[in-house]
Image: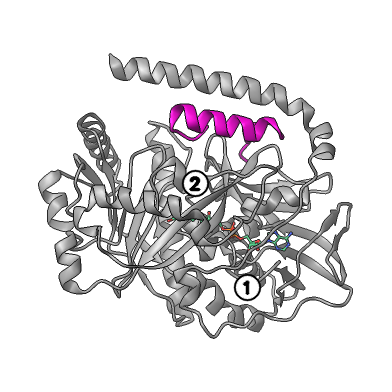
Amino acid sequence: MAGRVTRLRHNITGAMLLGSAAAASTTWPIAAKIFPEQLEVDDNISYWAAQTPDYVPSAPLRKTIAADLVIIGGGFTGVSTAYHFSRRYPEKRVVLLEAKSLANGASGRNGGMMLNWINGVETDDTEILRRVYQATSSGIDLIEEIIQRHQLPVDYRRDGTVTIYTSAERAEKKHAEIERLNAAGIPGEFYDCQTLAAKLNMQGAYGAWFDPGTGQLNGAQLIRSLRPILVEQGVEIYEHTPVLKVREGSGITLVTPEAEIKASAIVLATNGYTGKLGYFREAIFPLHSHVFATEPLTPEQRAALGWHEMAGYSDDLDRISYSTMTRDGHLIFGGGSNQSYSYLFKNRTAYPGTPDSASHAFANMQETLRQYFPNSADLKIAYRWTGTLAITLRRNCSMGVRGQNRNVFYALGYSGHGVTLANLAGQVLTDIYSGDDQQWRQLPFYQAKFSPIPPEPFRWMGYQGFTRLTGRSPRA
Ligand SMILES: Cc1cc2nc3c(=O)[nH]c(=O)nc-3n(C[C@H](O)[C@H](O)[C@H](O)COP(=O)(O)OP(=O)(O)OC[C@H]3O[C@@H](n4cnc5c(N)ncnc54)[C@H](O)[C@@H]3O)c2cc1C
């Protein structure tokens, strides 16, 4: 009964949120003038980036050029599109423009969890579930295939991850759901407390959903080691080249600080930064998420902690916390509280200051980790960083094409669940471009619509009010 009342309250809050967001959205034209925004891109100081110490960004674009396809953004979305597109169309001129360096954004700063499923898709329809599982598990296979095909020096593991349930009721519900998934041919296992403890001895877990074949990926290594492969496939890559303006037409003009590019088609591969180009402003907001990595743990420390085997876990809470263990023993941890995430006024895309200025957030996160693993209190932190992700109100992502001339392709809005999907995006967008996209049409991300999010100042006030009053993140 209590569960039903809570659900009803969330539904009403969600409906109110959607209604007021839609009403406030009518003020966009005025808000955009009163609160002008600009792109901010800070340095990637993550553990993942630190594993690519010899990486030197390529030179910026300094001359006017023309191309068949220009990809804006050098994360998983941009690089996977460059990879698949240039293999399918070796005769076309493909250019990738990156504001700073490849993997400087979320793809090189995340929690490393390489997962199945799509955020924001809630359905009991077995056919949709089967399609989503099939698409995402083959997405993970594809990442591994590419690493092996080109013998890339990328740290990854695929020994499975768990979602842990922090209430007996939710654990039991999931148990029943897993049985339904299994009956539909989708693998996965329910771990009771004892089974979970033998692998991952977490306090406060009532059970877990083990998803085999998922794992952990160093995104910075994947993207940066793919650069020479892309160049070999004919892709021109310009780093330190932010796109400042997009002028649409049957041909598109892109303006950068030192050049103009004429493109027959473009790809928005800019996820949390996309609003700065004037696209999807009403659909996406950039959220900053803090992450830390410990010093490498010795086998004894791992045993004392209770992390015996498992690539990683996430929990079932609204302010989700997630953690992975690298093969050489660095524990990576992110999320877990209001403090570990922030939205900054006017959609800022860089978190200001140093990790020290967010020390309260990191202390709070260490405390969340300690509650799950009491022996983690004394672990030494080696890296702290913050990344910008794109959040949508329903947590759904979308991949498709837009514009009067159907020449603006996009894949974005992964809402913190994009390692697998953004790598799959390159294949999806290449298929949409070629018109051979039948296999993606039945998937929930295909040309998916977003719920509207109001402009400033309602956006900031709404976020602050909602998160403080409820301890949750706005969603509808
Ligand atoms: C802290 C954090 C933890 C996360 N943890 C996980 C996780 O464990 N598992 C998971 O599945 N997902 C996770 N995610 C989400 C996942 O990392 C993203 O969904 C995914 O990396 C998005 O890839 P992308 O290429 O679309 O965007 P990005 O990697 O953000 O790349 C966009 C690129 O575009 C560039 N750019 C932006 N604007 C311009 C411009 N105007 N001109 C030129 N270049 C531009 C940026 O510099 C950036 O390099 C996490 C994200 C964050 C931030």
Q: Residue at x 65, y 79 (%)?
A: 57
Left or right: 405 as drawn, with respect to 232 = right
Ligand 1: give its quadrant: bottom right
Q: Which residue is drawn at 46% across and 79% down?
A: 149
What is the crowding at mark 1: few (fewer than 14 residues within 10 Å), some, or many (at least 20)?
some
* Circle 1: residue type: Arg
Label 1: which secondary element:
helix
The residue that label 1 is drawn on is 87
| Magenta run includes residue 78 | no
The residue that label 2 is drawn on is 341
Q: Can residue 304 be seen in this view?
A: yes
Q: Position of residue 164 (x, y in %)?
A: 27, 44
**Ligand 1 lies under 8 Å from the Cβ of mark 1:** no
* Circle 2: residue type: Tyr
Q: Is residue 203 above or below residue 89?
A: above
Toward the viewer: 136 or 160? 160
Q: Is residue 476 visible?
A: no
Q: In which quarter of the image is residue 75?
A: bottom right
| Numbered disc in front, either 1 or 2 | 2
Return the disc, 1 or 2, that comes first in the chain's sequence.
1
Residue 256's mark?
none
Left or right: 78 as drawn, with respect to 116 = right
Q: Which residue is drawn at 28% across and 56% down?
A: 212
The span picked out in magenta is 447-476
